[in-house]
Amino acid sequence: MSVLNADLHCHSTASDGWLAPADVIRRAHANGVELLALTDHDTLAGLDEAFGTARELGLNLVAGVEISVTHAGDTVHIVGLNVSPSNPVLLAGLASVREGRSERARRIASALEQVGIEGALEGAGRFAHNPEMIGRAHFARHIVARGLQPDVGSVFRHYLAKGKPGYVDHEWARLSDAVSWIRAAGGIAVIAHPARYRRTSLQMDALFDDFVACGGEGVEVVSGSHTSDEVSRFAGYARRYGLLASRASDFHGVNESASDLGGCAPLPAGVEPVWTRFASANRH
Ligand code: AMP
Ligand code: MN
Ligand code: MN
Ligand code: MN
């Protein structure tokens, strides 16, 4: 029996991935991925290049995005799959999310300065290909490059995770807005890596209730960051809430991701794969 090697969440240099969009496509193709979605944070800027290379190699690609959302005081990520990349509602919504990022980056830099890390804004900027897109991953890479921490994971644990000295509060998009932009662009909204949200079971249910109420249709059951217990748990959520199931590496780069492109576990039995809803891929 063959199972489609679909990978519906990954990043390029258009946000905080290490590889250019064309190189993400080449690596996915070399790894045997049969259906890919490029889902950069809050931008569609990598898609043109990605589609060019996908066409050359004959890789099925769908347009995607990962939108930063604030829900019940916490950040959650909503992936939009198979969106139309020229939809004005989606483009305007994403531009509004990006607007807050530069100012947030300045606040992160001053928070880091308070604990003795100077010049972090310039340093992070050297790792970002677009100054509008500076995020915590770029700060983390700078701090590693300066030799202050051994790896990005440990920078997050010491400085950038919620409650740590370099963490600043920020108001991202509303859940209902993010879902409606994705739907306006003809896409399917999917809750990204749900096991990564620190929520009680009641709070998790509230997220799923609200998500379904505003038109969300899918959840990442398999994510590069999910353990097999977490896969089972969110397969249960998919069934209970009638959601489509996605499979996603969340690849950012070779040394920074739990899973390589196409490398995560297959979807478990008893859930409906989200890609059964894609009319056709690579149709950009
Ligand atoms: P931001 O959108 O600026 O808050 O950055 C979020 C990104 O930071 C995520 O998409 C990951 O790329 C990265 N990230 C978040 N938490 C961690 C972590 N614990 N270890 C490594 N990278 C992380
Ligand atoms: Mn990221
Ligand atoms: Mn994410
Ligand atoms: Mn991601």
Image (cartoon, rainbow, N blue to C red):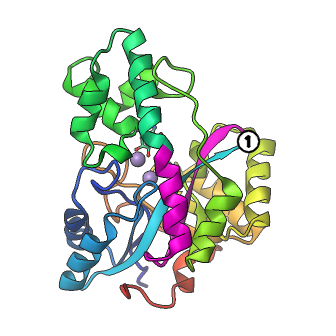
**Where's the C terminus, which quadrant?**
bottom left
Residue 273's place in the image compared with 121, above or below, is: below
Q: From the viewer's perspective, is 16 left or right of 214?
A: left
- Which is more toward the observer, 271 or 108? 108
Query: Toward which corner of the image does residue 44 lie, by quadrant?
Result: bottom left
Say what secondary structure mark 1 lies in: loop
Give the residue drawn at x 72%, y 70%: 215
**Which sits in the foreground, 273 or 45?**
45
> Which quadrant of the rendered structure holds the N terminus?
bottom left
* Residue 97 lies in the magenta stretch: yes
Position of 240 compared to 261: left or right? right
Label 1 beta carbon less than 8 Å to ligand 1? no
What segment is highlighted magenta in the picture? Answer: 72-99
Q: Does 264 sit left or right of 75 as displayed?
A: left
- Image quarter of residue 217: bottom right
* Residue located 46% across and 26% down the image: 107
Residue type at numbered disc 1: Ala
Q: Which residue is mark 1?
A: 72
Vertical order, 279 against 242 (above or below): below
Residue nearer the viewer, 254 or 37: 37
Q: Position of residue 266 (x, y in %)?
A: 47, 68
Crowd class of label 1 (few under 14; some 14 to 19; many from 20; radius 10 Å)? few
Instruction: Inspect the magenta stretch and tell me whether residue 109 lies in it.
Output: no
The residue positioned 75% from the left and 38% from the top of the image is: 200
Please state the horizontal and vertical placement of residue 253, each as a whole percent of the image: 27, 50
Residue 269 seen in the figure: no
**Residue 155, quarter of the rendered image:** top left
Total labels drawn: 1
Residue at image location 36% in from the left, 85% down from the top: 282
Ligand 1 picture quarter: top left
Residue 126 x, y percent position in the rendering: 21, 37
